[in-house]
Image: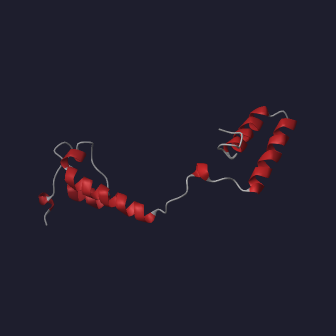
Amino acid sequence: MAETNFPVCTHCGHTWGEYRARGLLGCPHCYVAFGDGLQADIGWLHRALALAIPEAAPAADAAPDPETLARWREQMAEAVRSENYEEAARIKGLLGASAPRGPGLGVA
């Protein structure tokens, strides 16, 4: 198939063949010029990524292990002893974010 059979962006002259060869568009107007083909490529890419990337558990639901919590408490105590209150507050935030939440646990 000859290069002239590919769609061409009327603004920058970039062709569909150039896009497919490099994976890059020439300008914002290429999105309109190659619309249907780009939608197909983007759809394929999203499906391929969904298969390739395992679903991870949300970080907010994962509680730190007991060793990490103990290390954070120790670091917070050291920060207070050295009067580094900003660091102590940051670590306190980590500890608070990892505390169990819900009815009957004292934290809403």
The image quadrant that residue 28 belongs to is top left
Q: Please, is residue 12 above or below residue 82 in the view?
A: below
Instruction: List the single residue furthest toward the front.
Output: 104
- Please give the name of the residue rendered at 82% of the width and 39% of the height, measured from the top-left corner: 79
Instruction: List the single residue furthest toward the bottom.
Output: 1
**Residue 20, percent across and down?**
27, 59
**Residue 58 located left or right of residue 72:** left
- Please give the name of the residue rendered at 31% of the width and 55% of the height, measured from the top-left corner: 42
Which image quarter holds the C terminus? top right
58 or 42: nearer the eye? 58
Q: Please, is residue 80 above or below residue 18 in the view?
A: above
**Residue 64, percent across and down?**
69, 53
- Please give the name of the residue rendered at 76% of the width and 55% of the height, measured from the top-left corner: 66
- Please give the name of the residue rendered at 74% of the width and 39% of the height, measured from the top-left corner: 92
Instruction: List the single residue furthest toward the right.
Output: 81
**Residue 23 located left or right of residue 77:** left
13 or 88: nearer the eye? 88
**Residue 100, percent across and down?**
68, 47
**Residue 63, percent across and down?**
67, 53
Which image quarter holds the N terminus? bottom left
Q: Please, is residue 74 above or below residue 57 in the view?
A: above
